Amino acid sequence: MNEIIRIRGGKRLSGEVKISSSKNAAVAILPAVVMASEIVKLYDVPHIEDINILISLLRKLNIKVDVDGDNLTIDPTDIQNIVLDDSGVTKLRASYYFMGALLGRYKKVKMLYPGGCDLGPRPIDLHLKGFEALGAKVKTYDGMIEITADELRGDEIYLDIASVGATINIMLAATFAQGRTTIQNAAKEPEIIDLSSMLNKMGARIRGAGTSEINIDGVRRLKGCIHDIIPDRIEAGTYIIMAAAMGNNVRVDNVIPQHIESLLMKLEEMGVKMEVGSDYVLVKGYDELKPVDIKTLTFPGFATDLQQPITPLLAIANGDSHVVETIYVKRFKHCHELNKMGADIEVHEPSNTIHGPCKLHGANITATDLRCGASLVIAALMAEGETVISDAYHIYRGYDSIAQKLRNLGADIAED
Ligand code: EPU
């Protein structure tokens, strides 16, 4: 896998780019397949590193996974619930969905602690409290976590924070619990709706996904299904921001505009001209870019995952923009890298002030995490001269064929 991306900036972008399926839906859907007693077919699965790792973890569990282009056929009929102590577990956050899925099906799961991007503290206390409320016992030792239950029983669970991961994990375990589980203050992200519609096709009885109250009536068995994963709203947002900065009529295709309304409203406020269709956004450009203030929030608020990518655009706006990050208060490492390129950003966690307008120039910079990487790619496309982005593997974790997609739009980008 290439570790370095080189971009010679300043090229105008035009043409069409097709958005891949959602990483954060797919990374919940793949672990959920362990709950099925029959074959599951997934279409349009993104080609990203996180998916490759999850496929290898499914295979460790003796599940057959056939990859045919974008489509996966997953046969879990010979599954073995072995200890997941493979280093892959620690490479991504979403490996924690094996907890809910295997606990639900086998009432026992033992695995390494999950990893993921370093965005400051990322506790999983709400996931574990949820499992305990369903009757499970949790033990942690030597980097391992073991969760067991004699039986799982539905309960009313209130989440102190509307956590995406905790909502999904509890939904997975509760699918096989006896009776009804109600999750109050559930997260409402579209990826949760996608997972619940797949589980319901398999025979689960989940109501209310996408609202703050989800009801799950336990079932004893899940059958197979065929499922198309929703488009990736964060990848879509990333390309729309890129097109706003450097594009001349860039059409971003395979988008659900309702999933990115908060971003589209902010871009409009900044002066970006767009045509929003039923499944595309045509970004036309801007006459003048105005600064805006952004506060990240849970869905449908402004996504924390787009806070880093939009920063370079704010850096060239005519005036000061302020960002308040309420989800991951330390998600600002990209600012230090952008400052090496000529941006003028003051970080005072959990917020920053972006003094615009600045002129970006090429530099040697490092992708410290996935969305920091996306932010640096956007800045590099805008900058004068060559930018070398190291640790690009973070970017490949979440962006399908990014270099090829950008080259098709006219960018000068190379990988080595
Ligand atoms: N939190 C707790 N306790 C918990 C769980 C969460 O305190 O038990 C806190 C977190 O520390 C954070 C907040 O609650 O401050 C929200 O975290 P959440 O659980 O919602 O996030 P997540 O499930 O770990 C997912 C995405 C992230 C995305 C966030 C927020 C996946 C695999 N990851 O993370 O995506 O930023 O929701 O929308 O779905 C990314 O794609 O780059 C990425 C980091």
Image (cartoon, rainbow, N blue to C red):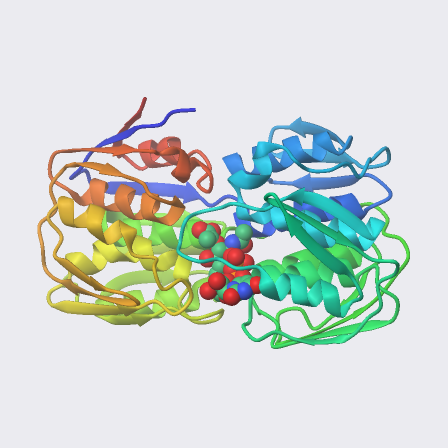
Q: Residue furthest top?
A: 416
Question: On the picture, is 100 further left or further right than 355?
Answer: right
Q: Position of residue 104 (x, y in %)?
A: 80, 55
Q: Position of residue 398 (x, y in %)?
A: 46, 42
Question: On the picture, is 168 further left or further right than 176?
Answer: left
Question: On the picture, is 23 further left or further right than 348?
Answer: right
Q: Residue furthest right?
A: 220
Q: Position of residue 22 (x, y in %)?
A: 54, 49
Q: Residue furthest front?
A: 141
Image quadrant in which you'd find residue 7: top left
Residue name at image x 33 percent, y 43 percent = 368
The quadrant the C terminus occupies is: top left
The answer to whether any part of residue 88 appears in the image is yes
Relative to 355, residue 407 above or below: above
Residue name at image x 52 percent, y 45 percent = 115
The quadrant the N terminus occupies is: top left
- Nearest to the observer: residue 109 or residue 28: 109
- Nearest to the observer: residue 356 or residue 181: 181
Image quadrant in which you'd find residue 39: top right
The answer to whether any part of residue 48 appears in the image is no
